[in-house]
Amino acid sequence: MSLTVVGSIAFDAVKTPFGSRERMLGGSAVHFALAASFFDQVHVVGPVGEDFGEDEHAVLQARGIDTSDIEHVEGGRTFFWRGEYGWDLNDRTTLDTQLNVFADFEPKLSEASRSSDVVFLANIQPDLQRAVREQCTAARFVALDSMNLWIETARDSLMETISAVDGVMLNDSELRELTREPNLIRAARHLKARGPSVVVAKQGEYGAAMLTDEGFFSLPAFPLESVVDPTGAGDCFAGGFMGYVAAHPDAELGHDVLTRAMAYGTTLASFNVEEFGVERLVRLTKEEISERVADLHRVTHFDEQPLALRG
Ligand code: AMP
């Protein structure tokens, strides 16, 4: 089985209180693919410019990711994003977004990418997400992410794309903004009523919450003492989550499988934020992931002992 992702393939400039990078490999599809590559074969779909070279391909290929659907646009420039974080790392400011080659992108998927069993429409213009969704007719589970830029500039298109997927993963503030509903559970129900069976609200350092057909589940973030750069955490969460789903092709996607997917998503995201951009993910090992999932289980699991309370 395999997993296809469409999303931004980018160069990022990022400043946090702990340092900065002027130009590093990033993008929603890149972070996602690196995280998901620990679970299954990943195909990345998206355009890049002439400034995207062998070194960037090599980062993905070193993790066995299929880059043959990365389209090189002659004379074009790769998507560029600049962001800055203050002391509250949950709150970031976008200083610049240059769509560049994404402005005229028309996704054409190879047979391998089209026939994936699991598909992630990472953060990018919702028309493009839909164009990929429509080509992936064999998919068993399709989910999407988005952001405030698209909620504000392409809301109707985003809603249409949401109706065509099984899962939605948004930051809690985006979920509220999109549904115009301040209560997260009601906001998630609002989206579920449009079609998706799973809605995840990502809450940065506070973790993530999920609403499925069977109920509500919430998981804190892994307790880290050092967070350096949160960029791409949401995409790595999605990579771990969707990767876990892809790795269970015969399982019914019930609440239990999805809660375990949340634990893998949380774990992959926790590694990503320890260093800038993809610096930590490219060195990550499967042993480190398994160890941290077990630690996360220890931290979040408690043994209930009924207590007779005073009346
Ligand atoms: P996250 O921190 O998970 O929201 O993802 C950060 C990544 O999203 C960065 O690597 C950026 O290149 C990418 N990004 C930022 N803005 C956009 C946008 N408008 N469309 C697509 N990708 C974006």
Image (cartoon, grey):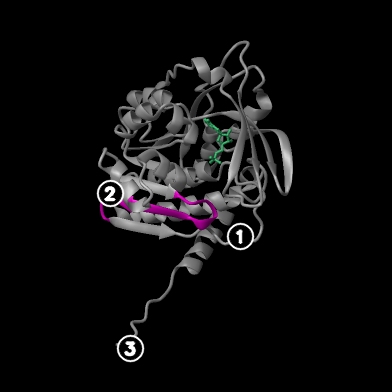
Q: Provide the residue designation for mark 2.
A: 252
Q: CA distance from mark 1 to mark 3?
A: 37 Å
| Residue at x 68%, y 28% (from the top left corner) | 55
Camera-nearest residue between 134 and 172: 172
**Residue type at mark 2?**
Glu
Q: Give SS at disc 3.
A: loop
Q: Where residue 10 sits in the image (x, y, percent)?
A: 60, 29
Quadrant hosting residue 140: top left
User: Exactly how many numbered labels are in the figure?
Assistant: 3
| Residue at x 49%, y 31% (from the top left corner) | 149
Quadrant hosting residue 48: top right
The boundaries of the magenta stretch are 202-214
Q: CA distance from mark 2 to mark 3?
A: 43 Å
Q: Provide the residue designation for mark 1.
A: 224
Camera-nearest residue between 23 and 89: 89
Mark 1 burial class by Cα count in 10 Å: few <14, some 14-19, many 20+ = few
In the image, residue 212 above or below residue 44: below
Q: Where residue 283 sits in the image (x, y, percent)?
A: 65, 46
Q: Is residue 244 visible?
A: no
Q: Provide the residue designation for mark 3.
A: 310
Q: Where residue 287 sits in the image (x, y, percent)?
A: 57, 55
**Residue type at mark 1?**
Leu
**Residue type at mark 3?**
Arg
Quadrant into which the N terminus falls: top left
